[in-house]
Amino acid sequence: MSTPANAVDVGYIATLARLALSEAEQARLQQNIEEVLGYVALLRDVDVTGVEPTAHAAPIFDVCRPDEVGATLPPEAVLANAPALIDESLIKVPAVLGDQAESA
């Protein structure tokens, strides 16, 4: 029995994925895959003339508010809360990369 060129061999895929499937499981999965591919084949016949391509089924709106310039803290207030300073204008923080940061 020959198989079509686009047929999916569930047994071969299971072997590649190192899955131990029984014959019954392979037969069930083979049928499921063939059904899915059948539905996909039906979509080829759908007339989509005039349908705008989209990545989502429903419109997506930006829910973030626009950036607005607002009041900021004066530098003296920010630096007053710093645990340690460098040159009285920069905040000293602990290294997060360990030895790699020191050698760079």
Image (cartoon, rainbow, N blue to C red):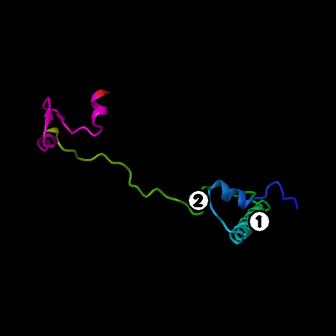
Horizontal side of residue 81 vs 59, given as left or right: left
Front position in the image: 98 or 44: 98
For the question of whether residue 52 can be seen, the reply is no
**x and y percentages locating residue 16 in the rendered image:** 65, 53
For the residue labelled by badge 2, is the local secondary structure a helix, a strand or a loop? Answer: loop
What residue sits right under mark 2 in the picture? Answer: 56
Q: Which mark is residue 104?
A: none
Is residue 81 rendered magenta in the image? yes
**x and y percentages locating residue 67 in the rendered image:** 36, 48
In this view, the mark in front (1 or 2): 1
**x and y percentages locating residue 2 in the rendered image:** 87, 59
**Quarter of the picture holding the N terminus:** bottom right
* Location of residue 33 (image quadrant): bottom right
Is residue 33 rendered magenta in the image? no
Distance Cα–Cα, label 1 vs label 2? 23 Å
- The residue lying at 71 percent from left, 67 percent from top is 26
Above or below for 34 versus 104: below
What residue sits right under mark 1 in the picture? Answer: 38
Front position in the image: 72 or 94: 94
Horizontal side of residue 66 vs 78, given as left or right: right
Front position in the image: 85 or 53: 85
Crowd class of label 1 (few under 14; some 14 to 19; many from 20; radius 10 Å): few
**Quarter of the picture holding the C terminus:** top left
* Location of residue 45 (image quadrant): bottom right
Front position in the image: 44 or 33: 33
Task: Specify start and end residues of the magenta stretch as a single range.
Answer: 77-102
Task: Name the kind of residue labelled 2 in the image.
Answer: His
N-terminal of the two: label 1 or label 2?
1
For the question of whether residue 89 can be seen, the reply is yes
Task: Name the kind of residue labelled 1 in the image.
Answer: Gly
